[in-house]
């Protein structure tokens, strides 16, 4: 008789429910975590593209190879695209485009472009 009461009480309890709730909520937590990582990578890509554009514009404004300087200033895994900087009589403008890989499946790589302008040294 005593074991029967114990069995009924055990069957009516809510043990294990929290584990099921966690298992149901886990995919949402993973997507939020991956989205945070993706935003961080995009921010890093923006920072790297800006740094590369400034380096390319600075070197090109002084008569150097701005394309090489822009590519050297950016992390290689971002696949920097640095066209030759445009020089005017007063200013030099450089553009750097990087590709940030996608972390979340089904969302492709992101392209980030930054421009920088420096005064041309005469």
Image: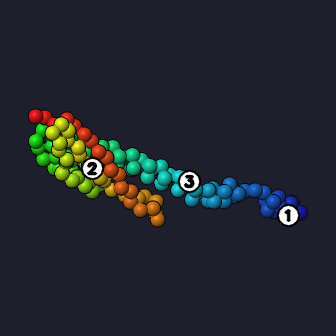
- Give the vertical position of 66 relative to 120 (above or below): below
Residue mark closest to the camera, 1 vs 2: 2
Image quadrant containing the C terminus: top left
Quadrant of the image occupied by residue 56: top left
Q: Circle 1 is placed at which residue position?
A: 4
Tell me, yes or no, whether the two marked residues, 1 and 2, touch with CB atoms within 8 Å.
no
Image quadrant containing the N terminus: bottom right
How is colour applied across the structure in the image?
Answer: rainbow
Q: Nearer the viewer, residue 108 or 27?
A: 108
Q: Earlier in the sequence, mark 3 or mark 1?
A: 1
Q: Earlier in the sequence, mark 1 or mark 2?
A: 1
Question: Farthest residue in the front direction?
Answer: 89
| Residue drawn at (12%, 47%) of the image | 65
Q: Position of residue 97 (x, y in %)?
A: 29, 53
> 10 Å neighbourhood of mark 1: few (<14), some, or many (≥20)?
few
Q: Position of residue 82 (x, y in %)?
A: 23, 52
> 10 Å neighbourhood of mark 2: few (<14), some, or many (≥20)?
many
Seen in the image, is 34 located left or right of residue 19? Answer: left
> 10 Å neighbourhood of mark 3: few (<14), some, or many (≥20)?
few
Q: Earlier in the sequence, mark 3 or mark 2?
A: 3
Q: Is residue 58 visible?
A: no
Marks 3 and 2, how far apart at CA: 34 Å
Q: Circle 2 is placed at which residue position?
A: 96
Marks 1 and 2, how far apart at CA: 75 Å
Q: Circle 3 is placed at which residue position?
A: 29
Q: Position of residue 99 (x, y in %)?
A: 33, 56
- Label 1 element class: helix
Q: Is residue 71 visible?
A: yes
| Residue drawn at (23%, 46%) of the image | 94
Seen in the image, is 12 located left or right of residue 83? Answer: right
């Amino acid at each position: 008789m005593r074991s029967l009461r114990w069995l009924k009480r055990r069957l009516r309890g809510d043990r294990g429910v929290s584990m099921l709730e966690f298992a149901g909520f886990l995919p949402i937590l993973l997507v939020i975590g991956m989205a945070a990582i993706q935003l961080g990578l995009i921010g890093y890509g923006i920072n790297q593209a800006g740094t590369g554009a400034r380096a390319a514009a600075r070197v090109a404004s002084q008569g150097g190879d701005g394309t090489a300087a822009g590519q050297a200033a950016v992390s290689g895994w971002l696949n920097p695209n640095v066209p030759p900087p445009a020089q005017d009589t007063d200013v030099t403008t450089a553009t750097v485009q990087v590709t940030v890989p996608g972390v979340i499946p089904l969302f492709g790589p992101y392209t980030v472009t930054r421009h920088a302008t420096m005064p041309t040294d005469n």
